[in-house]
Image (cartoon, rainbow, N blue to C red):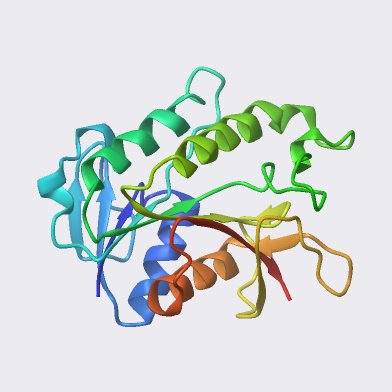
Amino acid sequence: MKIAVICANGKAGKLIVKEALDRKLDVTAVVRGENKTEASQVITKDLFDLTAADLNGFDVVIDAFGAWTEDTLPLHSTSLKHLCDILSGTDTRLLVVGGAGSLYTNKEHTAVVSDGPDFPPQFLPLAKAQGKALEELRGRSDVKWTFISPAGDFQAEGERTGKYILAGEELTLNSRGESIISYADYASAMVDEITGGDHIRQRISVVRA
């Protein structure tokens, strides 16, 4: 199975590359500059410069793009649209590293995490940008996409336990009432979806067991 990890130099991207390599998958890191991942196969190119030819032959493309500053937040939508456009009509799966702010908090799916009174205001613009990208993704029937939201507390330096709960569109707590997952366990869940999952055109979520 051939996998391309876009924005592989990021914290999530590097761990996804490592997890996939540890499972003996064929991994190519897509980076803008120097490759800082464990992958030996590299495409050095900006995401927006990628073409259909660049991604031809990959079974799975992972979008680990992240933007954090106010002026770059719209790139969540434009970058995802670009990837969808160049993968349109192919059998290549597109797995997207998403956010938790767009997870629903009621059964009617009318309220999301980022609407809550306790949601940190500094993260609200990011949550709304990622939520907008997800809504636009839902309209793509020409791409085999899967959007994977982490738990609310997404810990970059957290340990890899190898245990997680696979959930759906709603914010899910573990038996201790926590919404937490490490980047390493998230990477494990991502690769599990690649190798054994079939959540095509669905948003799923993961939380530490």
Picture mark count? 0
Q: Residue furthest left?
A: 53
In the image, residue 72 sits, relative to residue 50, either above or below, namely: above
* Whole-percent x, y for residue 32 in the image: 26, 40
Q: Residue furthest top?
A: 71
Of the pair 168 and 16, the residue shown nearer to us: 168
For the N terminus, give its image quadrant.
Answer: bottom left
The residue that appears at 74% across and 48% down in the rendered structure is: 104
For the C terminus, give its image quadrant.
Answer: bottom right
The residue that appears at 41% across and 59% down in the rendered structure is: 14
In the image, residue 55 sits, relative to residue 197, either above or below, namely: above
- Residue 191 placement, left or right of 135: left
- Residue 79 placement, left or right of 184: left
* Whole-percent x, y for residue 53 in the image: 10, 47
Which of the 4 quarters of the picture holds residue 168? bottom right
- Residue 137 placement, left or right of 122: left
* Whole-percent x, y for residue 119 in the image: 82, 36
In the image, residue 137 sits, relative to residue 23, either above or below, namely: above
- Residue 169 placement, left or right of 8: right
The residue that appears at 64% across and 78% down in the rendered structure is: 161
* Whole-percent x, y for residue 190 in the image: 48, 67
Of the pair 149 and 15, the residue shown nearer to us: 149
Which of the 4 quarters of the picture holds residue 102? top right
